[in-house]
Image (tube, rainbow, N blue to C red):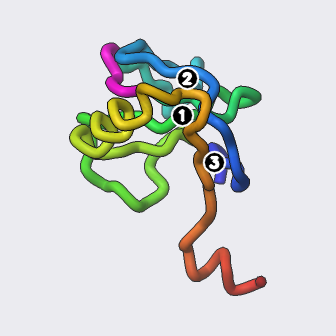
Amino acid sequence: NRWPTNEGLYQVWDRQLTTKMSGAEGKVDYYFIEDVPYIMYFDDWHGIALHGTFWHDRYGYKHSHGCVNMPLLDAEWTYRWSAEAPNDLCVWVHTSDPVENAGL
């Protein structure tokens, strides 16, 4: 809950083939990862993105600082599939956690 991915409908506003990502400086969960692949930024207020992930395989679980981690092949496919219309790629972020949905 310290690093939420805000729910809602977003439009991808920037794409990078690879980039460095870091965060939580000065904290226990500080991270710095070079060459993060297939980045598609969608929440510009928080710098949140869809991107390929090679440092873990816990997809579908909360395991990031807000970004949506994807298997490399899925991230590559999405990145290349949307290349011709980068401003038309939208992301719908929602929870599938039954605990979080219990109050709805």
| Residue 91 on image: x %, y % | 59, 47
Question: Residue 58 bears which disc, if any?
Answer: none
Label 3 or label 2, whichever lies nearer to me, is 3
Marks 3 and 2, the one that precedes in the sequence: 3
Q: Which residue is mark 1?
A: 49
Q: Looking at the picture, does residue 32 appear above or below residue 11?
A: above
Q: Which residue is mark 2?
A: 23
Q: Quadrant of the C terminus?
A: bottom right
Looking at the image, residue 67 sits to the left or right of residue 99; the answer is: left
Is residue 46 placed above or below 78 in the rendered structure? above
Q: N-terminal of the two: label 2 or label 1?
A: 2
Percent position (x, y) of residue 17? 36, 17
Span highlighted in magenta in the image:
34-39
What is the three-letter code of the residue carrying label 3?
A: Thr
Q: CA distance from mark 3 to mark 2?
A: 15 Å
- Going 48% across and 44% down the picture, which residue do you hit? 68
Question: Front-most of 84 and 14?
Answer: 84
> Which residue is located at x 62 percent, y 54 percent?
92
Report the residue that reaches farthest toward the front.
Answer: 84
Q: Earlier in the sequence, mark 3 or mark 1?
A: 3
Q: Residue, x 38% and y 32% (percent of image)?
A: 79
Label 1 sits on a secondary structure element that is strand
Q: Which residue is mark 3?
A: 5
Pointers 3 and 1 in contact (C-beta within 8 Å): no
The N terminus lies in which quarter of the figure? bottom right
Residue 29 lies in the magenta stretch: no
Q: Position of residue 27 (x, y in %)?
A: 57, 27
Foreground label between 3 and 1:
1
Amino acid carrying label 1: it is Ala
